[in-house]
Image (cartoon, coloured by chain):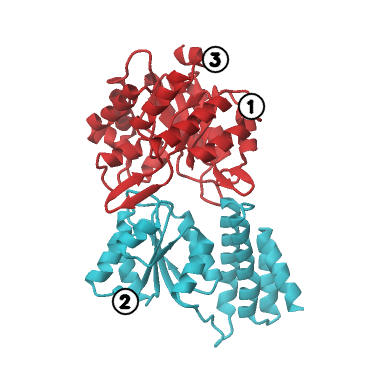
Amino acid sequence: MLFQEWLKDDSKIVLFDGGFGSELIKRGLKSGKIPDILNIEKPEVISDIHESYYNAGSDMCQTNTFGSTPLNLSHHNLESRIEEIINGALENIKKVRPSERLIVGDIGPTGEFRPPVGNASSDQWYSSFLTQAKLLEPGVDLWHIETISDLEEMLTAIKAVREISKKPLIASITYKRTKRGFFTIMGDSLEKCVKALNNEDIDAIGANCTLGSRDMVDLLKSATNFTDKPLSVKPNAGQPVIRGDKTYYEQPIDEFANDIKEMIILGAKIVGGCCGTSPNTISAIRDIINFM
Amino acid sequence: MPDDFFKEIIDAIVNLDEEKALEYANSAINKNMNLLDVIERGYAAGIRRVGELWEDGDFFLPELMRGAQIMQTCLDLLIPHLQKGTEKISLGTVVIATIEGDIHSIGKTIVATMLRAYGFEVHDLGADVPAEKIVEEAVKKEADIIGVSALLTTTMIGQKKIVDLLKEKNLTNNFKVIFGGAPVTDAWVKDCKADGFAENAIEAVRLVKSLLNK
């Protein structure tokens, strides 16, 4: 299996894709819509974005299904269209996927927090992730559960995916930086999360979003102390700035790419970008990887 | 000594001990204490300490929400017993909401709690609230401040709508408008001609105080 071969090959750095939301904003995404519905409403735009990342050098790209758990879709009155949305997502990426490249099933958070922050139960989470995973499974080569801000939610998602799939799985949590180090907004420390994930039936441990590339370098330094599993990083290219009606991400690409280089030297196996990164960012990283 | 009693209340809130916090509230009522003092120097002081711990990175969302819940439960118990004529004198009135199209509410809820803790009357309209409704409520409640939260770059544009609506209705001088939410920046506030933004609940309190000269 290609992904497993990549993991075993010490000389291979796996290049993920970059931000999706920021690419949609560039293409005039309308206010208030979640990107997942565009699998049905604007399939050509979605395919175009996937293609631009594969062309830029991504080894693997994520399906446009970040928000497609039933729980999250229900917030936008789209739960009844989940099958249509996910099937559309799979078609859109399959159309443009080159050979020897992979399709990653993207699973994002349910948007429901456990008490006292919200009212979600583990059972609700489990059932929601299971529904999404069942629909995605036939069309993906591996999984990326990402941007999760609660260790409990991540462990539940892993359990749900593993219920119906043995395909490789990357588990990425999103951390913020505090005076005391890296934590999720629910208070799980980096150490607690990485150690817990180290014991799970997953293939790589990741961190994505919230942090820019500079902070992600420091996170990675710390994370390598707690696991021997392959590590995945997808930092943001800074924070968005709105001028007039346009959104800009202002971190220079070469600065971001150099931070990624540093992360590779520190031991990152899988690298990519999150909010604010683009196909140009991926090209720059591809050049760096090829040169190393 | 009242000071010891207030310290016990603060500790109960910081320790997230609802049972103790309610016990003290009942005790204060039964002993006919000055309940305004009890609220301000006990419960509000407690939640302010929780806010400080959150800023320091010692407390996280669960602690913040639990602290806010416990405080509100105790206030619900105490406020009906406030002696006539000693009703809380508010430092100002704030109408707060998350803009239409956006369901994120945790940050806004915490800001509302902190503002109440610091003496403001706060009307929290919830999330996904149309700009027209926010303005309507601000007029009804004779608010001093309108606070609008947006967490998505796609819904931020609704914050500008509030300012534009006020201008349309010739109400610009009646309210100060402040923004909140991760994507908000100085540049955005200037663009919208709003009166400021805050990155967290403690900053929001400072901003509101300075805008109202308190």
Supply the letter of whichever chain is cyan.
B
Dot label at residue B70: none
> How far apart are the two marked residues, 1 and 3, measured between alpha carbons?
17 Å
Q: Amino acid at mark 1?
A: Thr
Q: Amino acid at mark 2?
A: Asn
> How far apart are the two marked residues, 2 and 3, measured between alpha carbons?
65 Å
Quickly name the residue at label 3: A10
**Above or below, comparing residue B213 to residue A162 in the picture:** below
Q: Residues within 10 Å of mark 3 (few under 14, many from 20)?
A: few
For the point 31% across and 32% down, the residue is A85
Residue A276, located in which quarter of the rendered image? Answer: top left
Dot label at residue B173: 2
Q: Are marks 2 and 3 on the same chain?
A: no
- Relative placement, left or right, of B32 versus A47 is right
Quickly name the residue at label 1: A227
For the point 59% across and 71% down, the residue is B77
Supply the letter of whichever chain is red.
A
Q: Residues within 10 Å of mark 1 (few under 14, many from 20)?
A: some
- Relative placement, left or right, of A226 versus A273 is right
Q: Are marks 1 and 2 on the same chain?
A: no
Q: Amino acid at mark 3?
A: Asp
